[in-house]
Amino acid sequence: DSGVTQTPKHLITATGQRVTLRCSPRSGDLSVYWYQQSLDQGLQFLIQYYNGEERAKGNILERFSAQQFPDLHSELNLSSLELGDSALYFCASSERGTGDSGNTIYFGEGSWLTVV
Amino acid sequence: AQTVTQSQPEMSVQEAETVTLSCTYDTSESDYYLFWYKQPPSRQMILVIRQEAYKQQNATENRFSVNFQKAAKSFSLKISDSQLGDAAMYFCAYRSAWSNQFYFGTGTSLTVIP
């Protein structure tokens, strides 16, 4: 158990719909990262937040948005969904701030999104 | 931006044998961290091993060890006594010591042959 919690684990929705994926980072971690992994693909970095502020943005579509709340949990919002958005969405966290473990990124189990 | 290259999309190894997965990276920084992550069929991302660039000693974790060549910007993963449960996708990753951004390679799919 990495300590990163993602909900829901599985989600099936129709094209054109909007979904929200939720992530609770490890206790004390200030950074949250979102990644997209399509079938048989590598990890595509979407966006990173640090202590509530956007820190880095990757290949995130305009239809997607994210935020990190004061309690450090994060949400990834996906709207106007298309078939190609079907993927495994990972949340990860880092920056516990003490010792070497503070420099490591830990992943949640992912949220499987299927768009039909 | 830093880049991480895994030139072996697929590798295979006989059970109980040793296999080495390659990773190279491009950076102008002197202080950074390197990682190997394992992604089994369950798709969970699991940290295998971590190396700090300032440490000359290669990291080891049980049957997993790395060969860190800082000058060559190479960070290979050696798996000894391969087991069926080692079959997975392996990702190499880089993190600057000065930022909390991570860069991942494209992965190497490892098959373990019984």
Image (spheres, rainbow, N blue to C red):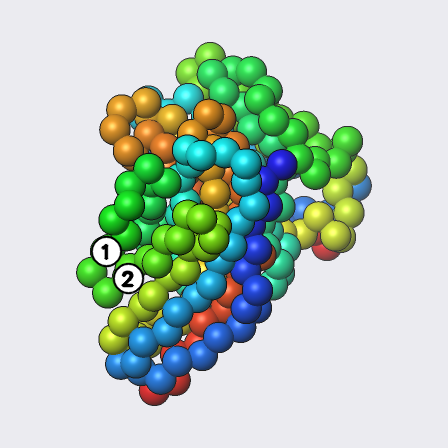
Residue type (three-letter) at the residue carrying disc 1: Glu
Q: Residue at x 54, y 68 (%)?
A: B8
Q: Residue furthest top?
A: A70
Q: Quadrant of residue B48?
A: bottom left
Question: Can the viewer see residue A100 in this picture?
Answer: yes
Query: The residue tagged with tag 2: helix, strand or loop?
Result: strand
Q: Is the C-beta separation of discs 1 and 2 under 8 Å?
A: yes
Q: Specify whether A83 is left or right of B63.
A: right
Q: Quadrant of residue B2?
A: top right
Residue at 67% across, 52% down: A86
Q: Position of residue B12 (x, y in %)?
A: 45, 79
Q: Is residue B43 left or right of residue A4?
A: right
Q: Which residue in the protein does label 2 denote?
A: B64
Q: Quadrant of the N terminus of chain A?
A: top left
* Residue placed most toward the observer, A3 or B47: B47
| Furthest residue toward front | B71
Q: Is residue B87 above or below residue A79?
A: below
